[in-house]
Amino acid sequence: SILAVVRDGQRVDALNENEDGEIVLDKTPFYAESGGQVTDTGVLDAVAGNAVVSDVQRYVGGLIAHRCRVNHGELRAGDKVEARVDVDKRRRTECHHTATHLLQAALQNVLGAHVHQAGSLVCPDYFRFDFTHFEGIGGDRLQDIERLVNQYIRVDAAVQASSMPLEEARAAGAMALFGEKYADIVRVIRIDGISMELCGGTHVGRTGVIGCFKILSEASISSGVRRIEAVCGDPCIETIQARDRTLLRIAHMLSAKPDALEERIRALLDENRRLARDVEKWKQAAATGASVDYMSGVQEVDGVRLLATVVDGQDAAGLRALMDHLRDKLGSGVVVLGAAYEDKAAICVGVTKDLTGRIRAGDIVKRIAPIVGGGGGGRPDMAQAGGKDISKLPDAIAQAGDVMRELLKKK
């Protein structure tokens, strides 16, 4: 029955339809959030109404409050209620909680007795387990751990809960969470032949109920503390099936059987590297082999030779290599190149050493880069710029002659 009703921190007589509040019962089947395990959810049914329970918290003195919203009718202090836990959520959560105990046993077996729990979160969909360890865990050892947990599950060991004095539990070898404060009488979860821990959470009756176990990830979260995220039971099957679907989709995309995917991907990566090398060769060939065509566009500005043109198929690095080549080819003069690459404008200016006292590459770049909506700079003999407006790139390069003329007059 309902002992008390609370709304907005104040005790009231009742919760009405669509109102949120907290309800305290004389007894409850709901698990209150504690020890890393999430709370139960469910419903409270009374003759005059019902409410959905979204959270359950234990307060000082052992008082348990059910946070809920009334769906219809009202729930009033003194009402008799039927408290129903979401059984599917509880079942999944129990599987994951028992699995944390199996995982700790497996970690100690594979990595060593120095492993101890440093925290956990137990949910219906997955769990995470934090533990002390001084280094990363390689793939082979992770598989050993996963295999051992699944062995523990298959032996279908009994999971038994009992209460005993704290000192007696410690003397019997029960593991406790470091830094946790315990009452004089504690609850002990014993998994026959596998594990014995102090724990107040909910668990399966036998390990076989868990079904299967799969590690999702392993990583460091702080110095000397690592975290494993894992799933078991139905979420484990759902995860494996989802990965299988992804694998089949990728295999279909690559026209390969799933067991031949690795070989197919390696071949594609090799081909991609080869093609990348070929592209670089073609860029270099374009930068050097077609220089005669570029040189035909050389003009004179106040006695200084200028080659200003827009080129195709070059990124910023390729543009720089082409500029160096053309500047050497020019002998004495100025080279101004522009190229559109990945929806951006790139400009590269080179000045031969004999002319840097009269005109500097950086001054030219600063004048023409704003035309393409960008900016840049560099040394007297070489400068680069980038911009967003590739449509204005021809205009910017065409301005090079006028800019040179103005700069030369200032000398």
Image: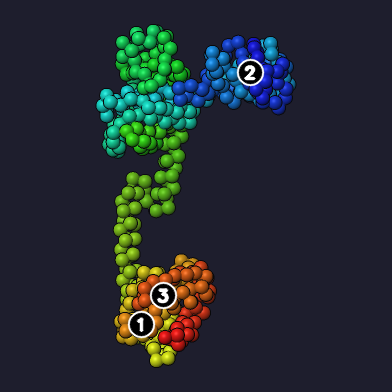
How crowded pointer 3 is (Cα within 10 Å; few <14, some 14-19, many 20+) is rated as many
Q: Residue sitting at 33 percent across and 86 percent down?
A: 332
Distance from disc 1 to disc 2, alpha carbons, whole Å, reads: 86 Å
Query: Would you say residue 214 is visible in this rendering?
Result: no
Distance from disc 3 to disc 1, alpha carbons, whole Å, reads: 12 Å
Q: Is residue 333 left or right of residue 391?
A: left
- Callout in the foreground (2, 3): 3
Residue 247 has which mark?
A: none
Could you tell which of marks 2 and 3 lies nearer the N-terminus? 2
Could you tell which of marks 1 and 2 lies nearer the N-terminus? 2
139 and 320: which one is in front? 320
> Badge 1 is on which residue?
357
How crowded pointer 1 is (Cα within 10 Å; few <14, some 14-19, many 20+) is rated as few
How crowded pointer 2 is (Cα within 10 Å; few <14, some 14-19, many 20+) is rated as many
What's under tag 3, amino acid-wise? Answer: Gly
321 and 60: which one is in front? 60
Q: Residue sitting at 46 percent across and 19 percent down?
A: 201
Q: Secondary structure at mark 1?
A: loop
Q: Secondary structure at mark 2?
A: strand
> Badge 2 is on which residue?
23
> Badge 3 is on which residue?
362
What's under tag 1, amino acid-wise? Answer: Gly
Position in image of residue 19 (x %, y %): 70, 26
Distance from disc 2 to disc 3, alpha carbons, whole Å, reads: 75 Å
Q: Is residue 245 left or right of residue 19?
A: left
